[in-house]
Image: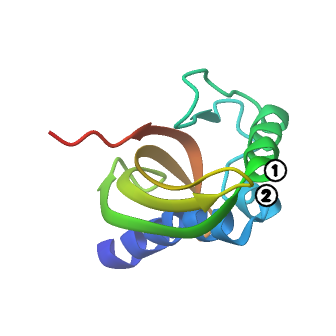
Amino acid sequence: MKTETENLIKATMQGFAEAWRAGDVDKVMKLWDLQNPEMTYVPVDNNELIRDPKALKAYFDSELNGFTVTSAEMLEPVIRMVNDEYAYGFCLYQWAFESATVTGTLRSRATCLLRKQGQRWYYLHMHESVEVKG
């Protein structure tokens, strides 16, 4: 049961990378617990806490409007169950992107709190930061 649950959580985390790679904001948004007033996100490029679905969608729209994600991969996922309804997820995301003026790569670290609804797991909180090696 633990492995099945962990695989469902990892599917949500992998879905984040896949939705960005597809450039599909609606698909990204469907990964979040948007009805929960406690939903929050701290993006990798901005330390301000995003607290509501409209602001979350506006952020994702603006990011995907500025560049194209050419590759996205979830690496090294770790799941820690809190109880049957909540779990922490940790992973690295490897991103490749391009815009009219720049092409690059970025590796981000994501710390997440996910909540189960029905048979699916949704983000309640995610904090991304640039991976620093050293």
Image coords of residue 73 (percent x, y): 46, 69
Of the pair 101 and 36, the residue shown nearer to us: 101
| 51, above or below 93, in the image | above
x then y, percent, for residue 16: 59, 61
CA gap, disc 1 and disc 2: 10 Å
Quadrant of the drawing holding the C terminus:
top left
Q: Quadrant for the N terminus, please.
A: bottom left
**Is residue 57 visible in the rendered structure shown here?**
yes
Report crowding for label 2: few under 14, some 14 to 19, many 20 or more residues within 10 A (C-alpha).
some
14 to 26, vertically: above or below: below
Q: Nearer the viewer, mark 1 or mark 2?
A: 1
Residue on which the image places disc 2: 25
Between discs 1 and 2, the one toward the N terminus: 2
The residue lying at 36 percent from left, 55 percent from top is 91
Reading the image, the residue beneath label 1 is 65
**For residue 63, above or below residue 14:** above
Given the image, on which type of amino acid does mark 1 rest? Asn
Q: Outermost residue toward the front?
A: 101
Disc 2 is placed on an element classified as: helix
**Left or right relative to 3: residue 61:** right
Would you place residue 124 above or below residue 76 in this image? Answer: above
Can you give x and y, in whole percent of width and height, for residue 21 in the image? Answer: 64, 69
Q: Which mark is residue 126?
A: none
Q: Residue at x 41, y 75 (%)?
A: 7
Q: Nearer the viewer, residue 84 or 79?
A: 79
Q: Residue furthest top?
A: 48
Name the side, left or right, on which 14 lies relative to 133.
right
Secondary structure beneath disc 1?
Answer: helix
What is the quadrant of residue 38 in the picture?
A: top right
Pick the residue in front: 93 or 119. Answer: 93
- Applied colour scheme: rainbow
Where residue 130 appears, x then y in whole percent? 40, 40
